[in-house]
């Protein structure tokens, strides 16, 4: 199934241009971890890979740009209070508006990968966990092989 309106190569090129080298490596690691974990829960590997790849796509935006996009997103005052969580809803916005992601599960997993939420789906949990446990950039005490 096709989840984006652009090719995987275009996504990777965009990420290389818009992320730091470490953040790009983390995104690749998260995507691969999610892809490896997905079949254990009966989830589509390609879909998990795309969500993992894009989960931090806005992480390196300047604060001004992040706030401009954040104004277009539905965020709580608590979430807005911490700049460390801004990139999650902004990344979901970018995934939809830059890459043409329309799959609501992918967008929600990206949206909630930092703070989580009550009643997360298995798909959302995979992206949440993959972000924290991927082993290419995470500290050894947090990283776990799938």
Image: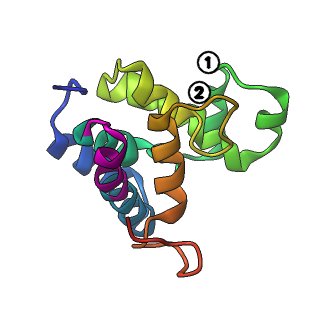
In the rendered structure, are the residues bearing label 2 and label 1 in contact, judged by CB atoms less than 8 Å apart? yes
Compare residues 98 and 105 and report the one nearer the observer. 105
Q: Position of residue 76 (x, y in %)?
A: 78, 26
Compare residues 25 and 98 and report the one nearer the observer. 25
Q: CA distance from mark 2 to mark 1?
A: 5 Å
Assess disc 1: are there few (<14), some (14-19) or many (≥20) residues with their C-alpha within 10 Å of its C-alpha.
Answer: few
Residue at 29% of width from left, 55% of height from top?
A: 36
Residue at 78% of width from left, 45% of height from top?
A: 82
Read off the residue under disc 1: 72
User: In the rendered view, does 48 fall on the left or right side of 19?
Assistant: left
* Secondary structure at numbered mark 2: helix
Report the coloring of the rendering: rainbow
User: In the rendered view, does 48 fall on the left or right side of 86?
Assistant: left
Query: In this rendering, is residue 126 above or below 120?
Result: below
Residue at 47% of width from left, 71% of height from top?
A: 144
Q: Is residue 127 covered in magenta?
A: no
Residue at 43% of width from left, 19% of height from top?
A: 104
Read off the residue under disc 2: 69
The mark found on residue 3 in the picture is none
Please report the bounds of the magenta region as a residue range.
33-44
Magenta part, dominant SS: helix
**Quadrant location of the C terminus in the rendered image:** bottom left
Q: Position of residue 1 (x, y in %)?
A: 16, 25
């Amino acid at each position: 199934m096709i989840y984006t309106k652009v090719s995987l190569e275009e996504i990777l090129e965009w990420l290389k241009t818009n992320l730091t080298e470490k953040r790009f490596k983390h995104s690749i690691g998260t995507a691969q971890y999610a892809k490896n974990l997905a079949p254990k829960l009966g989830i589509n590997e390609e879909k998990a890979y795309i969500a993992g790849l894009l989960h931090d796509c806005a992480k390196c935006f300047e604060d001004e740009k992040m706030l401009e996009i954040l104004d277009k997103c539905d965020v709580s005052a608590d979430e807005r209070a911490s700049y460390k969580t801004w990139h999650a809803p902004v990344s979901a916005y970018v995934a939809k508006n830059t890459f043409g992601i329309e799959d609501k599960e992918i967008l929600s997993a990206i949206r909630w990968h930092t703070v989580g939420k009550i009643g997360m789906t298995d798909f959302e949990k995979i992206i949440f966990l993959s972000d924290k446990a991927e082993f290419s950039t995470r500290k050894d005490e947090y990283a776990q092989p799938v």
